[in-house]
Image (cartoon, helix red, strand yellow):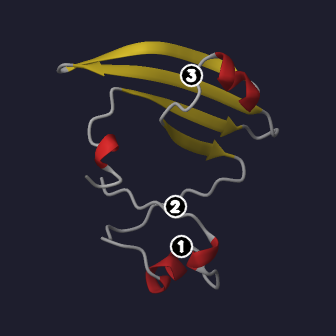
Amino acid sequence: MSVLDKYYRISQAAGIAIHIDSEGNTIIQVCAVIASSNELTIDKKVTNLDAVNQLRQHLPDKSIVALNLSGKGVLHKQIENTKSIDQQNFSKVLPNANGDDFYIQNFVS
């Protein structure tokens, strides 16, 4: 059994979106889902929270979550299709920056 085996079939998870608007206000949204058999059910949907500590009221402790950050101070850059990000193609996004200083996600769509 590998360390990741428990994540191959997740029965409950939540998505948390944190958006920082142009005035610095934080808007938090939560959607919790349950997977049972071949069905996915929305368990809870909460919008317009304004503080991270409010999440505890809506999600059980040790919930598995996917986190999305957007808005002021979060960099999104669309580039040509590439299989992986290395220092050379990272320089096309931010010249003179070091890719090791950033958390980078490469979405191919």
- Category of crowding for the residue at label 2, using alpha-carbon neighbours closer than 10 angstroms: few (below 14), some (14–19), many (at least 20): few
Toward the viewer: 41 or 17? 41
Image location (x, y in percent) of residue 95: 60, 82
Q: Position of residue 67 (x, y in %)?
A: 54, 41
Give the number of the mark in front: 3 or 2. Answer: 3
Q: Nearer the viewer, residue 88 or 101?
A: 101
- Left or right side of 40 for 48: right
**What mark, if any, has residue 77 been given in the picture?**
2
C-alpha span from label 2 to label 1? 7 Å
| Mark 1 lies on residue | 93
Label 2 SS? loop
Q: Earlier in the sequence, mark 2 or mark 1?
A: 2
Marks 3 & 2, CB-CB < 8 Å contact = no
Camera-near label (1 vs 3) is: 3
The amino acid beneath tag 1 is Val
**What residue sits right under mark 3 in the picture?**
60
Q: Position of residue 108 (x, y in %)?
A: 32, 57
Q: Does residue 108 lie above or below 8 as drawn?
A: below
Disc 2 to disc 1: CB gap under 8 Å = yes
Indicate the amino acid at tag 3: Pro
Q: CA distance from mark 3 to mark 2?
A: 34 Å
**Disc with the residue nearer the chain's start (1 vs 3):** 3
Within 10 Å of disc 1 (Cα), the crowding (few <14, some 14-19, many 20+) is some
User: Could you say where residue 52 lies in the image, as x and y percent from the top left?
Assistant: 72, 31
Q: Residue 76's image quarter?
A: bottom right
Residue extending farthest to the front is 1
Quarter where residue 71 is shown: top right
Secondary structure under badge 3? Answer: loop
